[in-house]
Amino acid sequence: MRRATITDVAKRANVSISTVSRVLNKNYPVSDELRQKVLQAVSELNYQPNAVARSLKKQTTNTIGVVVADISNPFFMQIAKGIESIVSPQGYQLIFCSTDENPTKEHTLLRLLYERRVDAIILASCDTDSSYLNQLAQNSFPIILIDRKVPNCNADVIVEDNFSSAYMLAQHLIQNGHRKICVINGPLKVSSASERFEGFRKALEDNGIDLKKEYVLEGNFMRCDAYGAVKKMILNHQNDLPTAIFATNNLMAEGAMAALREFNIKIPDDISLVSFGDISIPDLIDPKLTVISQNAFAIGQKAGEMALYRIKRGVKKHDFKEFIMVPELRIRDSVKNIEL
Amino acid sequence: MRRATITDVAKRANVSISTVSRVLNKNYPVSDELRQKVLQAVSELNYQPNAVARSLKKQTTNTIGVVVADISNPFFMQIAKGIESIVSPQGYQLIFCSTDENPTKEHTLLRLLYERRVDAIILASCDTDSSYLNQLAQNSFPIILIDRKVPNCNADVIVEDNFSSAYMLAQHLIQNGHRKICVINGPLKVSSASERFEGFRKALEDNGIDLKKEYVLEGNFMRCDAYGAVKKMILNHQNDLPTAIFATNNLMAEGAMAALREFNIKIPDDISLVSFGDISIPDLIDPKLTVISQNAFAIGQKAGEMALYRIKRGVKKHDFKEFIMVPELRIRDSVKNIEL
DNA sequence: GTATATATAGAAAAGGTTTTCTATAGAAAT
DNA sequence: ATTTCTATAGAAAACCTTTTCTATATATAC
């Protein structure tokens, strides 16, 4: 059975398709008599308008693309919820995509979304190449970068103050007497990873602590990589373990915990652990982790607002905004003072 | 700057739009000479085809709608990944939506997706009314129900064997000597909730244990509701606590844990806890929970396959398939044998 | 009583593709 | 040399809306 179109409705109600459209969209006066006939036909035929055709004509899809590293990461999930809380009441729907930290996949996803003519894209990029993004910007297509900057990219940006926060978090470890600190890095070509590492490094430097190369781990922001890296580090340093681990994101903190647990190394008694960003169900995890708490929901809200703003007002060259959110240090139970 | 269309490309290359389309889609022979000209024009104009127009013409969007209670629930997240693993290689993209267990929202979401002309919908319904779904089915629109049946609904169904699994899980508690068991229910009008409760109830009945009304809690499948219900239960039964809690889904198990923790009630020493479905990061939670482990990824895969099948083969009246996945009892550390 | 405004309705264009239908040129077959 | 096929290319229709442009009838103003 073919799906009813506006033409079918018009025929059944004995009116023109213009009239049907007007009744449905309530944007032009229609006599009560015809309105009744149209409504009747609509319900008899169980007509449901074709949003694809409407989008083609109106040149807008009421859709926003959201592309992040991994939507199952609670951090990005919270961002997604923040975005939705803003744009959903305005009639926009979201299309979520995960890049899995793979620049090629990211590029494909962006192209796909653009071809679908989403009205804007909110992106936490894992790429350093801004050429495609700038190409889109040139077509005055709105792009909102979140969580990660892309060098030379013409787009609005909503990021955290990674450097200062990481500095503060490292300082906290140092103040508790830690000198042998292991850091688990994300992919250093993404800005949040490198900024966090820089903040960490600077804190050590400022305190005259030198950073052992073996204590700098590659984790790629992913749990399994961090798990493997920590495990290997432990095996290689049985007699010279660091006193603390600094995970530069939540997933890698989880990976570290899993590895430590396997060797029965207790937090914080045997080793201290801090994380940049909250892990899943933090209230049920022992011990409660001392973290930099990012307000992911707020980042999402800001991104949603910015997207709507650009959709409505357009994107003008050389007029891009940058918001820097300030995270918070949450001192909990995973850092032991080893000076006492 | 207007976005380039196929017409712009055709003009620039001095060919017809048919030729451009053919070059891009590679579905009809085009001479090398013209092909070169077209490709050149495409790159000069930075042309990116309009998928909306293509969808309108081809009557397919290469999109599948997925609507579940809450995409931040790791159970549904795993399902989503399972679906994606199947449909993404075939060129389909997913649109995820959360109903928050709200039937009205579900209905709106379904309508929106249908108007967007997604090619199929995969749905974990929180509604008992099949009328709208059947209306869609009548338009031969493919609907795949997952996790939850809807009465009298013309659709393919992929569910777990909730009754037997719940029975098995309850039996496990009973075999460990538990008689005073508290159950936290989901919304009983959704099939998975009622079937799990029935399995639980039957196990008690078969063992001659009677179920106290005060031990039957309403949790609505949500963490906060379960948290509140358990807390209240504890306050009202300080001197007559159950020896075990049976949570009928993962989120409510988390809620129960949070509540118990607040009263410093230890699992499993003071009270045993089992869950239907794994909670977040189960390997990092103490103690490791004894659960019915649902293979959510497999459910997603099956749903993806079924969706593709229906998209390709169409939906015929009275020819719907039903798959029943068999979950597994995973005995871990959260149940204490109180007979010893 | 004529000119002008207002309310309502239909016709038709436009949005950007894909695909069928025609058309042409050259190759192959007779 | 004439017919038949094949390869290639363009014209035009179709997909389903929204919206502009016309048209008509009635109401208002002078």
Image (tube, coloured by chain):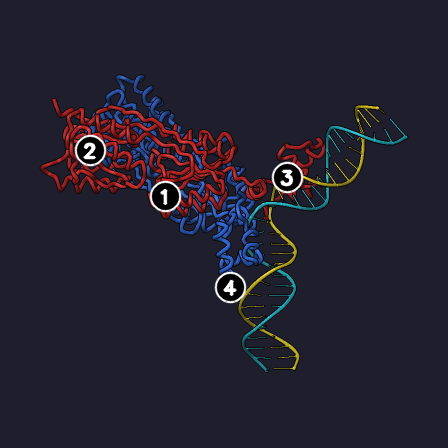
Chain colours: A blue, B red, C yellow, D cyan
> As rendered, which of A23 and A74 lies closer to the eye?
A23
Nearer the observer, disc 1 or disc 3? 1
- Give the residue pinned by disc 3: B44
At a point 42% along the width and 37% down the height, the residue shown is: B155
Question: Earlier along the polypeptide chain: callout 2 or callout 3?
Answer: 3
Mark with earlier residue (1, 3): 3
Residue C10 x %, y %:
61, 60
Do the residues at pointers 2 and 3 share their chain? Answer: yes
State the residue in front, B73 or B307.
B307
Residue A96, horizontal then vertical, whole percent: 43, 39
**CA distance for labels 1 and 4:** 38 Å
Q: CA distance from mark 1 to mark 3?
A: 45 Å
**Which of labels 3 and 4 is toward the front?**
4
Question: Where does the image place residue D9, in percent across and percent down from the top left?
Answer: 73, 37
Of residues B271 and D2, the one nearer the viewer is D2
Q: How far is mark 2 from mark 3, CA to CA?
A: 66 Å
Disc 4 to disc 2, C-alpha distance: 62 Å
- Secondary structure type for disc 2: strand
According to the picture, the residue beneath numbered tag 2 turns out to be B245
Q: Are marks 4 and 2 in contact (CB under 8 Å)?
A: no
* Residue on which the image places disc 1: B99
Label 2 and label 1 in one chain: yes
- Mark 4 lies on residue: A33
Q: Residue furthest left?
A: B239
Q: Tag 1: residue type? A: Thr
Which of label 1 and label 4 is nearer to you?
4
Tell me the chain of label 4. A
One can see residue A194 in this view: no
